[in-house]
């Protein structure tokens, strides 16, 4: 069983840095919105029944994939921002959402021309 703990003040500061706060995340009471420059279609991934808002999940996945960090490194980086997420949760997010996010980003990438 995973134990989640969140410092609400630190999370509010983290979310404010990531995006503007103007919407609700699937009615769970945590306010979040999606960045304006986000790839089209990213909202189609289902983040229902997840404790953290999509912006936190996407940021954790981005950190892991972009900088080739370990799951424990991502856990520590999120902990520095006041989010207590286990490395196992980050691993599950990467396995569940990583391929879909990568596929959608590949579709948006410009094709090589002849």
Image (spheres, rainbow, N blue to C red):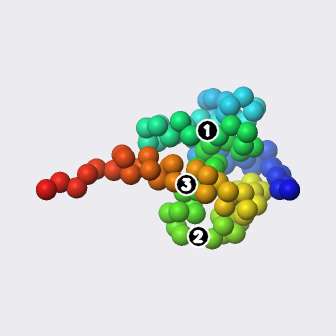
> Dot 1 corresponds to which residue?
46
The picture quadrant where one finds residue 39 is: top left
- Counting residues from the N terminus, which is met first, the one under dot 2 or under dot 3? 2
The answer to whether 1 is drawn above or below residue 76 in the figure is above
Would residue 80 be visible to someone looking at this image?
no
Mark 3–mark 1 CB contact (< 8 Å): no
Instruction: For label 3, count other residues whose C-alpha is less than 10 Å away and answer few (under 14), some (14-19) or many (20+).
Output: some
Q: How many numbered discs, if any?
A: 3
- Mark 2–mark 3 Cα distance, whole angstroms, equals 14 Å
The residue lying toward the viewer, choosing from 107 and 20, is 107
The residue lying toward the viewer, choosing from 114 and 27, is 114
- Counting residues from the N terminus, which is met first, the one under dot 1 or under dot 2? 1
**Horizontal side, residue 78 vs residue 18: left or right:** right
Q: Give residue 56's position: percent from left, percent from top.
A: 64, 48
Q: Nearer the viewer's eye, disc 1 or disc 2?
A: 1
- Mark 3–mark 1 Cα distance, whole angstroms, equals 13 Å
> Dot 3 corresponds to which residue?
98
Residue farthest to the left? 114
Give the quarter of the figure containing the C terminus: bottom left
Mark 2–mark 3 CB contact (< 8 Å): no
Secondary structure at badge 2 equals loop
Q: Residue at x 72, y 57 (%)?
A: 89
Q: Give residue 57's position: percent from left, percent from top.
A: 63, 49
- Mark 1–mark 2 Cα distance, whole angstroms, equals 25 Å
Secondary structure at badge 3 equals helix
Instruction: For label 1, count other residues whose C-alpha is less than 10 Å away and answer few (under 14), some (14-19) or many (20+).
Output: few
Q: Which mark is residue 28?
A: none
The answer to whether 41 is drawn above or below residue 107 in the figure is above
Q: Which mark is residue 69?
A: 2
Q: Residue at x 61, y 29 (%)?
A: 22
């Amino acid at each position: 069983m995973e134990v989640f703990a969140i410092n609400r003040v630190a999370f509010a500061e983290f979310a404010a840095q990531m995006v503007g706060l103007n919407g609700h995340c699937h009615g769970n009471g945590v306010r979040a919105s999606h960045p304006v420059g986000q790839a089209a279609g990213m909202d189609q991934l289902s983040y229902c029944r997840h404790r953290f808002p999509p912006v936190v999940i996407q940021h954790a996945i981005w950190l892991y994939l972009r900088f080739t960090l370990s799951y424990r490194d991502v856990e520590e980086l999120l902990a520095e921002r006041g989010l207590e997420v286990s490395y196992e949760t980050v691993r599950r997010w990467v396995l569940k959402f990583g391929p879909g996010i990568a596929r959608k980003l590949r579709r948006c990438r410009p094709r090589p021309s002849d």
